[in-house]
Image (cartoon, rainbow, N blue to C red):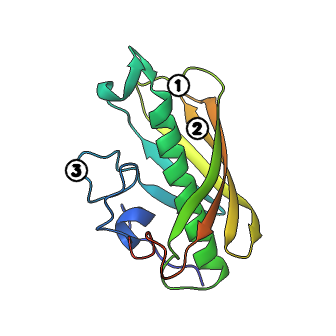
Amino acid sequence: MQPRIPPGKGLQETFAPHNACFGCGPANEKGLRIRSVPEGDKVVCRWRPEPHHEAFPGVLNGGIIGAILDCHCNWTAAWHLMRLRELETPPCTVTMEFTVKLRRPTPSDGELELIAWPVDVDGDIVTVESELHAGGKLCDLCTGRFVAVRPGHPAYHRW
């Protein structure tokens, strides 16, 4: 049975409404507040940058690209483990490593679409791949490994 996400909400708002992460925390008023939504076997995020996210006029800053891909992939890993293990809530996952390939300048003047999917699970570690599209073009790629943490880890209760 697949857990349900309320209409109009993402994984972050559903399972971690008090999370203050800069990239994905719904409770961070100054953060990016991305919203990751399961769509079949993938997780999709549609996000619109603002001018203060730019590296220079019309182009999104690479650090912002890294932040949104990192958080989106992390939530994809948590969602995958939740479904795989038939849990009611996702385990708290953190980034072990991630690599971003900036393939072309990412425009900042419209909605971005991030698509992520799990490619491997090794115990508590999930490898996720993702793409960032703008204006129908593939702009950036990300591969990362994310691990479900246990009690005693500083991030364990963050959600």
Q: Is residue 53 left or right of residue 124?
A: left
Nearer to me, 97 or 24: 97
Q: Residues within 10 Å of mark 1 (few under 14, many from 20)?
A: many
Total number of numbered labels? 3
| Residue at x 47% of width, y 34% of height | 63
Q: Is residue 122 visible?
A: yes
| Residue at x 55% of width, y 59% of height | 74
Q: Is residue 81 left or right of residue 21?
A: right
- Distance from disc 2 to disc 3, alpha carbons, whole Å, reads 24 Å
> Which residue is outermost to the left?
29
Which residue type does callout 3 highlight? Glu
| Residue at x 42% of width, y 25% of height | 108
User: Do the residues bearing badges 1 and 3 touch, measured as CB atoms within 8 Å?
Assistant: no
Query: Circle 2 sits on which residue?
Result: 132
Q: Is residue 1 above or below residue 53?
A: below
Q: Earlier in the sequence, mark 1 or mark 3?
A: 3
Q: On the image, which quarter does residue 138 sit in?
A: top right
Which residue type does callout 2 highlight? Leu
Q: Earlier in the sequence, mark 2 or mark 3?
A: 3
Q: Is residue 54 above or below residue 130?
A: above
Q: On the image, which quarter does residue 159 sit in?
A: bottom left
Query: Circle 1 sits on which residue?
Result: 106
Q: Is residue 97 above or below residue 79?
A: above
